[in-house]
Amino acid sequence: MQEEQRKRVVIAFQDFLNSPLDERLERHQHTSIESYALAFFHSVAATVPAYQTFLKEQDINPAAIQTIEDFQQLPLITKQNYLLRHPLADLCRNGKLETCDFIAVSSGSTGKPTFWPRFLTDELQISTRFEQIFHDSFYADTRRTLAVICFTLGTWVGGIFTANCCRYLASKGYPVTVITPGNNKEEIFRVVQELGSAFEQVILLGYPPFIKDVVDSGIARGVEWHRYGIKMVYAGEVFSEEWRNLVGERVGSTNPCYDTASLYGTADAGVLGNETPISINIRRFLAQTPTAARELFGDSRLPTLVQYDPLSRFFETHEGTLLFSGDNGIPLVRYHISDNGGLITYDAMLKFLAEWGFNPVEQLQQQESLTKVRGIHPLPFVYIFGRSNFTVSYFGANIYPENVTIGLEQPLIKEWVTGKFVMQVKEDADKNRFLSVVVELAPGIAESIDKQKSIASSILAQLLRLNSEFANYVPPEYQKPQIALAPTNDPEYFPIGVKHRYTRPAQP
């Protein structure tokens, strides 16, 4: 028996159950964030064999790391230089895999799974992110709530993790009931129609394009979404405010700031941050004020904007990308997640918006006709444009250029193409997403519909063979890529003398 495990669970569960949400979200105001980061580093350096080896290889003496400036000079860790170089047990505390009680899976560029062990206490920490949304946005402490888990189930991270966190809210006293149809649309329709009327609200939790597909398919099937007080929790992808409006209108939503929320999560460490009523309100203002958005983010694109708890995930930036430190089954110190983005303090955000004549707190109060509204916490903001490592996210699945490359290397097809392509997630007129692949034809090869069809089938076959996330996350009717054929050295997609990029940001 592992007595220490029992003690960890009792302490963590009591803290979660007995601490009001507001108290948990205010702890960072009474604690030195820098001291937390340093203490976390020393804890990992003392207990995790793989990190001890990593520091020795870098000729770093942990005792010499005494200030936040020292901490910020520590080398970044990545999958390649750390996670993939050590046995799974050595990445865990005290080199014991058995200190974790659950292992989830995410698939990499070749479809080979990456294993992510965690313990119940890790899930309890992340449950606060769900509590923020359920309490502050959906008032789930006062409303009978059915949480419908529409993330893929099985060994993959999203579904089981989300279901567990929602159940912990019920254990805390929230009138929340959880059901797990996964990404089975027929089962989702049955669940909502047969059980939804017994609750005051129904929350759909899933990847944005899948939730939209569920909503649209349900309307075609006669599902009266407006009867069920639908709320939605998204994860995995950037979407536009126009997209939020469209989906909201189709389920009868009247208040986007309090009817929806998006999670910023990763298989590596669970949920890192979440949308709040104030972050959504700010993003909607910036969507209508692109000049302000460009000044704030330094880009014409509108990123995902969430708030985070620096005592849960300590964020930093590095050359325009994000890194974080945080405790998990595999503790991570200055982990480079390869997302393009940045950080903004709460005060700096409000000051910037004031210069543009916008007060998000006052506007929420006016919208809700209240002097005090939920969801206003002085937590810092992190904004995320998406991965910088040449992947695209589609229905929550990371799609890698390597998957597509193999599809272009099959017999006959390889005679038609150069091997270059541009992969992008686009939206059609009805805001449905599709996977677009523009392929460069070899010199002297003419385009044809038959070539498009053959290439699409070949790429799809390799995606299904190599990428388990794609095969399980993306509904079959959305799996086949739409192929466009471009001539050699096409100036828009394959210009001469420019380093080729195989992906482009998702089309808003």
Image: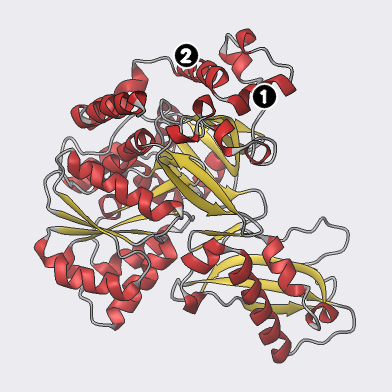
Is 178 placed above or below 79 here?
below
Colour theme: secondary structure
In this rendered view, identify the residue nearer to me: 66 or 436: 66
Callout 2 environment at 10 Å: few (<14), some (14 to 19), or many (20+)?
Answer: few
Is 493 placed above or below 455 here?
above
In the picture provided, is 390 more to the left or to the right than 262? right
Q: Residue furthest front?
A: 1
In which quadrant of the rendered view does residue 288 lie?
bottom left
Point out residue 282 in the picture as x, y percentages from the top left corner: 39, 44
Q: Amino acid at mark 1?
A: Thr
The image's mark for residue 53 is 1
Which of the two marks, 2 or 1, is nearer to us in this view? Answer: 1
In this rendered view, identify the residue nearer to me: 420 or 299: 420
- To which residue does mark 2 refer? 35
Callout 1 environment at 10 Å: few (<14), some (14 to 19), or many (20+)?
Answer: some
Real-space Cα separation, disc 2 to disc 1, in angstroms: 24 Å
Whether residue 191 is visible here, answered yes or no, is: yes
In the picture provided, is 355 more to the left or to the right than 25? right
